[in-house]
Amino acid sequence: MISTLCLGGQVMSKKIEFVQNYSDLSTQKGFQFEFYCNRCGSGFRTGFKPSVTGKVSGVLDAANSVFGGILGRAADIGDRIHSAGWEKSHDEAFEEALKELKPEFIQCPRCSSWVCRSSCWNTKKGLCKECAPDLGVEMSAAQASRSVEEVWAHAGMPDEDKKLSKENWKETIKATCPKCEKPLASNAKFCPECGASLINKEFCPECGAKLNPGAKFCQECGQKI
């Protein structure tokens, strides 16, 4: 942010330090700013500071309305005065707000985020808690996460499904009957709808040769399957 100063007819710029973690709530009637933590989002808001030039402009606007435009020229002049005066007052108000609230925050040298000192700064490590979390908090969170995993591991699958996964994990389990195409609720041997066999026969009952999946006849002896 840069404000402009006029000295001896020369225009000079004045640099104003600023931070990234703020919102400008200022209006033509006054100035107000919010500063917040980049990590947790909490922060502070300055009190509303009325703008003197905003009041002057408001009076001229009201007078111009009452007199039906007769004071229009005066209102235009007031707007120009208001614009320059407001910008100067705005810069001053911002500098004051920065001095007031900046000490509540600190910039992390690792990630450059501005964080609040009260909740998000690890004083021992000299870093924000995003870069250097409190170990006690992380250990507690890790234990809670592991507990949740254990709950899902032991209670997430019904006993019937656990048994199925242990005994038949290599077997191709059908979701629908290959004959009538009805959905199957369990790993049955026969379709409860049409009675079709759901288990593939791997060997020929006549000669013992290994059968191809879905074969209707044995490729070795011709036996009907």
Image (cartoon, rainbow, N blue to C red):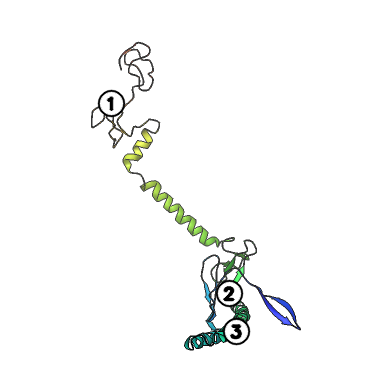
Say what amino acid the circle numbered 3 marks: Ile
Mark nearer the N terminus (2 vs 3):
3
Q: Position of residue 80 (x, y in %)?
A: 61, 81
Q: Is residue 136 above or below residue 175?
A: below
Q: In this rendering, does residue 97 appear at all?
A: yes
Q: Is the Cβ of the residue at disc 1 closer than 8 Å to that at disc 2?
A: no
Q: In this rendering, does residue 52 appear at all?
A: no
Describe residue 63's horizontal placement relative to residue 148 as left or right: right
Say what amino acid the circle numbered 1 marks: Ser
User: Looking at the rendering, in which quadrant would you find the N terminus?
Assistant: bottom right
Mark 2 = which residue? 104
Of 217 and 142, nearer the camera is 217
Mark nearer the N terminus (1 vs 3):
3
Q: Is the Cβ of the residue at disc 1 closer than 8 Å to that at disc 3?
A: no
Describe residue 178's horizontal placement relative to residue 24 as left or right: left
Element type at marker 2? helix
User: Looking at the rendering, in which quadrant would you find the C terminus?
Assistant: top left
The residue carrying pointer 3 sits among few (fewer than 14), some (14 to 19) or many (20 or more) residues within 10 Å by Cα, namely few
Mark nearer the N terminus (1 vs 2):
2
Q: Is residue 41 above or below residue 144?
A: below
The residue carrying pointer 1 sits among few (fewer than 14), some (14 to 19) or many (20 or more) residues within 10 Å by Cα, namely some
Mark 3 = which residue? 77
Mark 1 = which residue? 197
Element type at marker 3? helix
Of 101 and 200, nearer the camera is 101
